[in-house]
Amino acid sequence: MSDTAPVIEIRNLHKSYGSLEVLRGVDITAPAGHVVSLIGSSGSGKSTLLRCANLLEESQQGDVVFCGEPVKWRGSGMNRHPADRKQMIRIRTNLSMVFQQFNLWAHMTILQNVMEAPVTVLKRERAEVEAAARGYLEKVGIGDKADVYPAQLSGGQQQRAAIARALAMEPKALLFDEPTSALDPELEQEVVRVIKALAEEGRTMVLVTHDMSMARDVSDHVVFLHKGLIEEEGPPEQLFGAPRSERLRGFLSAGQAA
């Protein structure tokens, strides 16, 4: 793996569910330290693209490259699968995903939720992991909630716990799939502040979001997807300030949530 290669590179990606083509030949690149936001209306393929990058979904055509290392495939078309399980696990553990629904384990405390994967998947020492986990909970502003259970937290606090859990894996990149769309506006801002702080630290992130102000504020590069294709992409000041595509202009003026 190369330190100078983009963390994530996707080339000519195609993804179908039966006869439904969701991605029709998409290319994205996330260089180290950059934030790439994916925007577009519901059904445009944003979340599917993110899941294909993390190998949670299997694409039928195209390349997924992680830090210069291409994913190895066997089979083709609808029968294409990752060929190397160890490679797949290594890539997944280096691309931590934060979901729309927080996916915290209800029977574990917040601290246990954050510690679980580094201890069980990465086989790190429990004492070392606990110290790091408490640090990440402080970073996202809920250090005082370490010993409570998810049901005792607000939605915004649960999502911040999910971000701390993702950080605890010390990944090469963070992938966010609509991290604020399940929250009311007040709680949404708690999470937006954390994401902005992570962007300012220079973390590599790919962000699927309906929050155009967040995409404008945190992104180095914005990709507007429409019906499985990239309609327009570029720096946020270009896409939001002077969109060239009629579809993008319509999307922004309608204030669509995806």
Image (cartoon, helix red, strand yellow):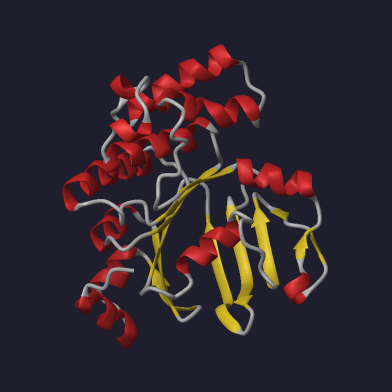
Q: Is residue 70 above or below residue 3?
A: below
Quarter occupied by residue 27: bottom right
Locate the C terminus by quadrant: bottom left
- In percent of width and height, residue 57 lies at 62, 62
In depth, the one of 72 and 149 nearer the eye is 149
x and y percentages locating residue 65 in the rendered image: 67, 57
Above-or-below relation of 24 to 120: below
Name, please, the residue furthest toward the left: 186
Please give the name of the residue rendered at 42% of the width and 33% of the height, measured from the top-left corner.
Answer: 164
Q: Residue furthest bottom?
A: 246
The answer to whether residue 158 is seen in the rendering is yes
Judged left or right of residue 171, residue 120 is right
Q: Find residue 128 and report its image quarter.
A: top right
Please provide percent x and percent y for residue 242: 26, 76
222 or 256: nearer the viewer: 256
Q: Is residue 250 left or right of residue 229?
A: left
